[in-house]
Every structure is written in structure tokens, then in C-alpha cells.
Image (cartoon, rainbow, N blue to C red):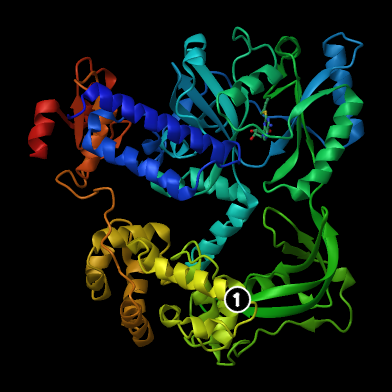
Amino acid sequence: MPKTLKQLSRQVQKLREKINYYNRKYHVDDSPEISDAAFDKLFEQLLALEKQYPELVSADSPSQRVGSEVSKKFENLPHRIQMLSLQKVTTAEEFAAFDQRVSEGLESNQDIEYYTEPKLDGLAVELIYRNGLFETGLTRGDGSSGENITPNLRTIRTIPLRLSEQIASKYPLLEVRGEVIMRKSDFEKLNETLRASNQTTLANSRNGAAGSLRQLDSSITASRPLLFYAFGISDRELPGIDSQQTAIELLKSEGFKINEHAHSSVGKSKVEKAFNKLTKKRPTLDYEIDGMVIKVNSFEEQTMLGQIARAPRWAVAWKFEAEQAETILLDVEFSVGRTGVVTPVAKLKPVKVSGVTVSSASLHNEDEIKALDIRIGDTVVIQRAGEVIPDVIEVLLEHRPKNSKPIKFPSRCPSCDRAVTRPSGEAAYRCLNFSCPSQVEGRLIYFASKAGVDIDGLGEKLARQLCQQELVKDPADIYFLKKEDLLPLDLMADKKAENLLAAIDKSRRAELPKIIAALGIIGVGETAAKILAAEFTDFDKLLIAEQETLETIAGIGPVIAENILAFFSDKSHRRMMDKLKAGGVKFLPYKLKSKAGVLLGKTFVITGTLSKPRPYFKKLIEDNGGKVTGSVSSSTDYLLCGTKPGSKEVKAKKLGVEAIGEKRLKALLS
Ligand code: IVH
């Protein structure tokens, strides 16, 4: 018997609850309970049901986290309550003076109860929950108003889309504040991907978070590994929330991620201890912090203390010393990556920088070396800012020894000895030898990595061996490996060889975007690969696509189009494609959430009360290729109007944007 809508709705609700639960376990509690595959399965079930019954889609469904909205620019919205900044101290004496001022302000001679939290180095945002539903999210901006980046924040898994019913009814308006950050390890991975596709890399994880949050296309944000840590609420007068600690506990129980090193510290000396402990912890943390925030715990006391200009009197940021050190440049080595780019790496006399021993630093490229005027033997200042690999930021010329040696960029590839060239307009030298061992190895590592077809067990060490033994000359060769080829390799037992062959076999059926990304075409990362896979369901058509066809695809553009063309017109790449096919790689057709359709290129704004919830219409429009944005502008094509449309209709009229009803929308769709 077919299910009634009510039964379906219950089924969908159950699924969402399950997904939310496992999502929280994975992203908030860092203790996953089911496998990724099992999670994906639940998620696919939900997507399928929502696709079949679009009327069941709701704004708080986990399906809404994938991101699709493209904004032209972000609108500015005021903060209801100003987002303040913090006074800063850098020494125990300065903190003692702050503590003294607090005591005087409260006319208290007892130890003050503080709440101490790591100062996360990301981007502060405010999340507005109305009746429990995540409604709007803003950047801090200038403190009085910020940018509306709701679609981007929605993609962050550690931001709950709905709060519990109990909290929703107790606090119909709840504004949660916190920091969006990117883990150091994730930042490194992102930079690697950017570097690999010749895009500008990001200086530190803070820029990684900020840059990802300010993407106009929220599907790009969705692909970036961002975390939200809640650090407070904006109101000081909510019933039942009388301190920072209570607020944090409430947020925690609502599923927000709370920093594990936040706690109450009573009295000046406890705070100092907490600061020293955090300083020691810092190098071991997988996220950047630049100090400790110390807040007077009681909201009543906070209110008594008030604020000066733009910072509260009840809180202070105790900042760490900068993470710099002096050392000596011993040598410069040059390494070659999969794209043939030759990168100079500074070899340093080992030195400790905030707890970590550093012996190499990045010198980026020849221009950087010239700009620094750096020579071997120089005393240099290095800085660990965000990246695990530090940067050389300064040369102390006064310490330059007489016998210092200028750095000579190699004219031949350090791996294959072929002459290197510096293409005009590029900062990098490249080895153009496709068979260069370092490149072959780099390509294989990339092909098998998570960014590519994701072959379990095929990492750097094995890739090196496979290339050195000349078992692999290009990634496609792995599909012809036999067990007897593998067994003579180091540390390769029977079982391991079998597992590897099974993993290789599995990758034959990898999704088309994965295979395209694995090829390592410059500029074609995960997003572009998805677009291409959706456009060219018949993979062979991509191989012969022309420049004009490629560059008109939304999200590709002329530069990437040229790279694709150049890639597939190269003979060795053609041979590799043939080998992939002969080796049994499937190139299965791929379907992007239907982006094509009759409404392609049309932008809608929805207003007023319609016969079904707005997300229903949003999905309907998007499923047919249209876009839905939040505010009417000259680039809006249609205003979908329900009853009581309000100011949007007035604006639409002014701008000459056509207002339509549900009937006309249906007509457009047919
Ligand atoms: S509280 C008055 N708590 O620091 C309260 N801020 O200089 C001000 N930040 O814009 C914010 N970690 O980006 C607070 N645990 C934390 C924080 C924190 C990082 C940043 C935040 C804010 C800046 C203030």
C-alpha cells in the first residue's frame, strides 16, 4: 500500500534525526559511530525522498547543507547588539592590571570568577535563530553591521540548523556568536589542492576560513572544511542564562561545538596558570590560536562593568608572543612536483619555534628569493604563521658572513636533468619533461589520493617504489598490475598485495568527477571536475570538446578551458586515456543535481505567503535550473509573489522586475 504523505513525512523526519545525530557525532564530538559509506547511504535515501516529494523539503533538512546559492554580493545587515572587540594584554603584569580594574569596577575584594577560552584565529560570526530555526548568519563586519553570509554558513556541519523545541520556545530569538575556523591539517590539504591547480595559495588558515566563507558560490564553501566553535550569545538578559558558563553549557547541549580548553578560572593566579597551560598546548592543537580570551563569568557583573568605546571592560585577550625565531640558512634544495614546478626549500639549522623543531622553510619561488635578497649562510627570521612549513620573513643583513653564497636557481631539473624553463608571466620554473621521475611519482600519488580516485593503501612510499621499479610510468599503468608484480616490493605481503589490487579494482568504478579530478589537469579540482562530469556524461565527448564549448560552461571559463584542451591534445595524455579504458576504468555517467532545465539562467526572488512553504518553491525553481536569491536587484528576472508581498514587490516594480504568481510559474515550467 502506498504511504500517505503523513507517513512519508514521519519517515523523512526520522531519517533527518538519524543524519543529524551521526553528523553531530562525527563533526562536533569527533567520535563517529558509523562508516562514511553508511552515512552516505542515509543521506542518499533522504535526497531521493526529498526529490520525489519536494513538498517535504524544509530549510533545516541536512540536504540543505550542500550549498548552491550564488550571490552577486553580500548584503549588509545591522547587528541587533554590537559585536565588540577586545582589549589586549601580553604579559602577566598587564593582566594583573586588568584584574585590578575589574575588582575596582565591581568594588570587590574577592577573587573574580573568570571564564577562560582559547582565542581562535578565524572569523567571528553571529548566527540568528528564530523560533529555533537558523535564519540568518552575519560576519562581524565593523561590529555594528556585517555581511549576510547565511547560505555559506548553512553548509558548515557544526552549525545546527534547528535547536531543540524546548530552547526554541524559551528563547524565540537566540543569537549565537562564535568563530569559524579551518583546521591546520585541512588548510594544508586545501593549499596543496590550490597549488596543484596553479591557483593562488592562502597565507594561513585564518585566510583559509575567511576566503572560504566569503565565496559568492556557497557550493564552494560547502566543499571547504570549515568548523564553527560557539563562544557566546549576544543577550545578557535571557531568563535562566546568567553567566558565560551557563551560556556555553546550553550551547553545548544544543549541539554546538564548544572548545575543549574553555573553563572557569577563579582568581588572577588560576588565570595565569591556565594561560601557561594553553601556551604549552598550543603547538599540539590542530587549529590556530593566538591567545586566550578571559571573560568575567557572571553576566550581572559584566553588565555592571559595561564597556569603553568598542571593547567591554569585562573581557580581555591575552595574546601569545609572535611565533618567530632566528636561525641560519644552510642550503637550498629544489624539489619537483607533479606539475613540474620547481620549488626552492630552505634547509635551516634546526631551531625551536613555539615548541616545534623546524629545519626547513618554504622559499616559494625565484622572485621571493630575490625580494628577500637571501644567501646561503645568512641569518634569517622565520615565522610559523598558520602553515606547518614556516616562511622566511626577513634576512638579517648585518649578520651576513663574508663567504655567503648567492642562491642559484637550477637550469636543469633536479630530478631528470632536463633543462627547466620559466614560462613568461609565471613565477615558477617548470620541468616540461612529462616522463620526469618526480612528476611521474607526483602524478601517481595525486591520482590515487582522496582528491583523485582514492585508492586505499597507495600512498607516497608505495608510489615511489612502483615508479622506481618502472612498474608505473603513468597512473593508468596501475590497472595492469598483477600480484606477482607487487610481491617483490618492500614490505609487500600476500594479503597486502591482494588488498591493494582490490582497492585498485574498486577505483575502476569511481565516480566520473573523481576520475576527471585524478587526471591532474591544471585548474580542474573537485568543483570543475563535477561540472565537467555533469556536462559530458559521455566522457569521449570531453576528449574532443572545443575551446568555445568548454569556456561557455558555467564555472569553467577560458583559462581552464585552455588547460583542458592542452591536456587532451597531448599525445602522452591521449595514450593514458586509452590505457585507462583498456585497463577497465568505467567512466560511468554522472548526474549533477539537475542544474539544467527550462529556468536555466533565470534568477528568482520569493516573497509573500504561498500555498506551500518557500523551500518547496525554491527547490522547484532550482531543480529546473533557476536560481533563488534573497533580495530583488536589477538582475532579478522574476519575483514570485504570494499574498502580502511587502517591500520586495515595491522594489521589483521600481526596477521593472516581472512579478508572477504560482500559476505563471507552473506555466513557465511547462
Ligand atoms: S569574545 C567582547 N571569545 O576575537 C567579546 N572572541 O578581538 C568579544 N575571538 O572578533 C568576542 N576567540 O573573532 C571571543 N573565545 C573567544 C574568541 C574570540 C576568538 C575573536 C573574535 C573577535 C575577536 C575580538
Is label 1 in a helix, a strand or a loop? loop
Pinpoint residue 352: horizontal percent, then vertical percent.
85, 59
Q: Residue at x 32, y 69 (%)?
A: 561
In which image quadrant can residue 47 be found? top left
| Of residues 525 and 308, the one drawn nearer to the viewer in this rendering | 525
Determine whether, in the image, residue 549 is placed left or right of residue 366.
Answer: left
On the rendered image, what quadrant is the N terminus found in? Answer: top left
Q: Which is more toward the observer, 258 or 149?
A: 258
The residue identified by callout 1 is 493
Depicted 502 relative to depicted 212: above or below = below
Give the residue displayed 71% in from the left and 43% down from the top: 289
Q: Residue 203 at what x, y percent from top left?
A: 62, 56
241 up-or-down from 649: above or below = above
Which image quadrant shows ligand 1?
Answer: top right
Q: Quadrant of residue 363?
A: bottom right
The residue nearer to you, when weighing 122 against 559, is 122
Q: Amino acid at mark 1?
A: Ala
Q: Residue 27 in the image: x percent, y percent?
A: 55, 40
